[in-house]
Image (spheres, rainbow, N blue to C red):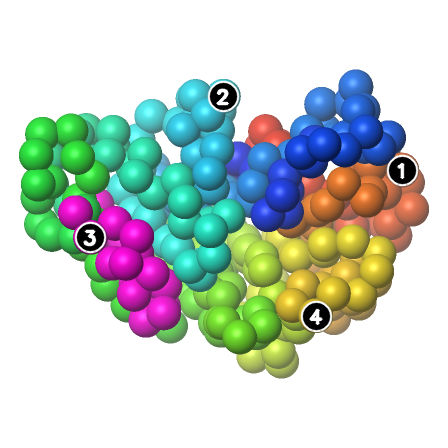
Amino acid sequence: MEIIFLGTGTSQGVPMIACDCAVCTSADPRDHRTRASIHVVMDGLHVQVDAAPEFRLQCLRENIRWIDQFILTHGHADHIAGMDDLRRFCDQHGGTALPVWSTEAGMARVRAMFPYAIGERPAAKGYAAFRLQPMPARLELPQGVIESVPLPHGEVVTLGLVFSEKSTGAKFAYYTDCKTVPPAAIALARGAAAVVLDGLRDQPHPTHMSIAEAVAVAREIAAPRTLLTHLTHLNGHSVLAAALPPGVEPAHDGLRLQL
């Protein structure tokens, strides 16, 4: 299984508009964070999770050339705004709709934002087309299983995702945008080789886990490797990496994991 981190930043991105702080002006490329999303390749199946406003640029940067399935964790702008750029992948599928999995609220947001893209085929050549489907608790595919679990994120629910590859048994958990990780989600993630957790900043936040909260969850799951995502400009990569306990590290745009 391969995991490509397309983006690891918060809704404002880093550098942030009109900010001259040490992180926003950093020369370390790991401090340049586009909005959070990942691309998972599981036994050759390409699964895109979320489409940030920079999605097109992320795909060009990381040479993403194919998508089989798309999962929208929730309908906030920093995760959905790039979905129109999925049109290129619909073209590659011969003009058929791309499977899009989400919550009921997530699907409603897609319908509201992209009404022209709902259907089995594009409205015109080169347009996007989405086949909306509710994400089940367990999505079984020839290449493996993708399990989902609800995560509280303010007034909305985010899909926590756990990927298990059929050929290798490799297991990976992706829990972005959440205030807590409930016991069911902790149990589901146990046994994963790598876990990604929302770790916004040091200070508490009403809808995201702080870094300390994420570290506490990492201890409960006890994965060999935990990576923090959805990071703000309040933490530089190198300083944060040095401060975190063993087994926990900040993710960065362009990071690739092989499990």
Report if residue 1 is visible in the image.
no
| Residues shaded magenta | 98-116
Q: Residue at coordinates 29% horizontally, 65% vertically from top-left?
A: 108
Q: Amino acid at mark 3?
A: Pro
Query: What crowding class fits label 3: few (fewer than 14 Cα within 10 Å), some (14-19), or many (20 or more)?
Result: few
Q: Residue at coordinates 53% horizontally, 35% vertically from top-left?
A: 6
Q: Which mark is residue 115?
A: 3
Q: Evaluate if marks 3 and 1 touch, with contact meaning CB atoms under 8 Å apart.
A: no
Q: Amino acid at mark 4?
A: Pro
The percent position of residue 79, horizontal first and vertical second, equals 47, 49
Q: Which residue was labeled with disc 4?
A: 206
Q: Amino acid at mark 1?
A: Val
Q: Marks 2 and 3: which is nearer the front?
A: 3
Q: Nearer the viewer, residue 28 or 65?
A: 28
Query: What crowding class fits label 1: few (fewer than 14 Cα within 10 Å), some (14-19), or many (20 or more)?
Result: few
Q: Which mark is residue 239?
A: 1
